[in-house]
Amino acid sequence: MDDERSDSESGTNPEPESDRELADAEDAIPLDHIPLHSTNLLTVLDEHGVVRYESPSIERIYGFDQSDLVGQQVAEYFHPEDRERVLGAFETVVASEDYTVEAVEYRHRRADGDYVWVESVASSDPTPEGHYVVNTREITDRKARERELRETNERLDEFASVVSHDLRNPLNVATSRLELARERRDSEDLAAVAGAHDRMETLIDDLLTLARAGERVEATEPVALASATRLCWGTVATADATLRVETGADVLADESRLRQLLANLVRNAVDHAADDVTVLVDDLPAGEGSAEYRGFYVADDGPGIDRERRDEVFERGHTTRDDGTGFGLAIVAEIADAHDWTIDVTESERGGARFEITGVEFQ
């Protein structure tokens, strides 16, 4: 027993580190290498907005060498129209007593004199030297998409105004004259004209709805999904159809547009299935057994939608009915997109169509 000693007492080396530990040590990246590989720009400013450090990605985003802006007032490189607003945001960060961050979008001048759209987030937690770290990413492509969407919405608003005034007024005159003519002597031909007028009225209503449905949702409120569904059910000609609502959740949405989305999905089910179709509205769990939700769905037990046609059903003007306008599901897609939701169509458990709306925030 006297000859037995511990490794430390005998002078032998301890067991070598595991292969995993050795691999982790070899693969470790020095912290000072991280800015070299970042897709964002890291800037360090003093409390007066003077640049103390720029990460190497400044060359990719702005075209400057890493040291070109060091020692200079960063505001000199902001677009004149954005300068006061960005400086105000930075002053808010400096004056803050907690660790909140301030995100701001603005235009920054490049080395070639052009401006690029960026978004910067500054932490109000200063470094030991009293400096502030700003994380910046380029958003030029996103701003271009937003501008394109805004211009599209403006064109749609103008189109909606034309449709509302220049088409509806003469249609109202024609409808009134037709009613007088049918009072004197009705016929199959006049009945056909009345049907054409009704279809024109439906088209105008759908076009107006489509034009407004895609406008970005700026404010939301908690909406009881079950109540909204039942209200929509009462506005649709549902014949002998049955509604099953198994959701008890509240979603954050523009209530009027959510109800329009639900009404169009219900109408689509009733129009494309038998009179006794059953429509089910329920939540989409975030995972099996999860109490969280990732969205909701509207399903039916009708004939369903062929797999090869599922990408087409949301296109404007796409319809399989002689009397359809082809705008119903296009409106649904526009409303979903305006909320930043995603909508997909698949097959329901009973072989019908199932429309899944995800990306929804629940209250």
Image: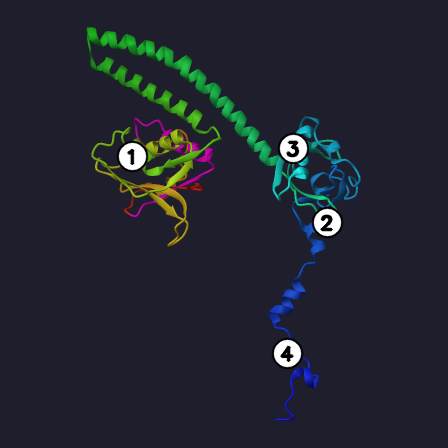
Query: In which quadrant of the rendered image does the N terminus lie?
Result: bottom right
Q: Which residue is drawn at 61% across and 38% down?
A: 103
Can residue 194 be seen from the camera position used here?
yes
Q: Which of marks 1 and 3 is nearer the N terminus?
A: 3
Does residue 177 appear to the left or right of 141 in the view shown?
left
- Report the front residue among 273 and 237: 237
Within 10 Å of disc 1 (Cα), the crowding (few <14, some 14-19, many 20+) is some
Disc 4 and disc 3: Cα gap in Å? Answer: 57 Å
Which amino acid, by three-letter code, is at mark 4? Answer: Glu
- Percent of width and height locating residue 268: 31, 34
Q: Give the range drawn in magenta.
A: 321-349
* Amino acid at dot 1: Arg
Residue at mark 2: 128
Q: Earlier in the sequence, mark 2 or mark 1?
A: 2
Q: Which residue in the protein does label 4 denote?
A: 15
Residue 230 marker:
1
Dots 3, 2 in contact, CB < 8 A: no
The residue indicated by pointer 3 is 106
In 3D space, how far apart are the residues under numbered discs 2 and 4 (Cα atoms)? 41 Å
Looking at the picture, tell me which residue is in the foreground, 112 or 139: 139
Occupied quadrant, residue 160: top left
| Structural crowding at the residue carrying mark 2, measured as other residues with C-alpha within 10 Å and reported as few (<14), some (14–19) or many (≥20) | few
Examine the structure image and report whether residue 339 is included in the region drawn in magenta.
yes
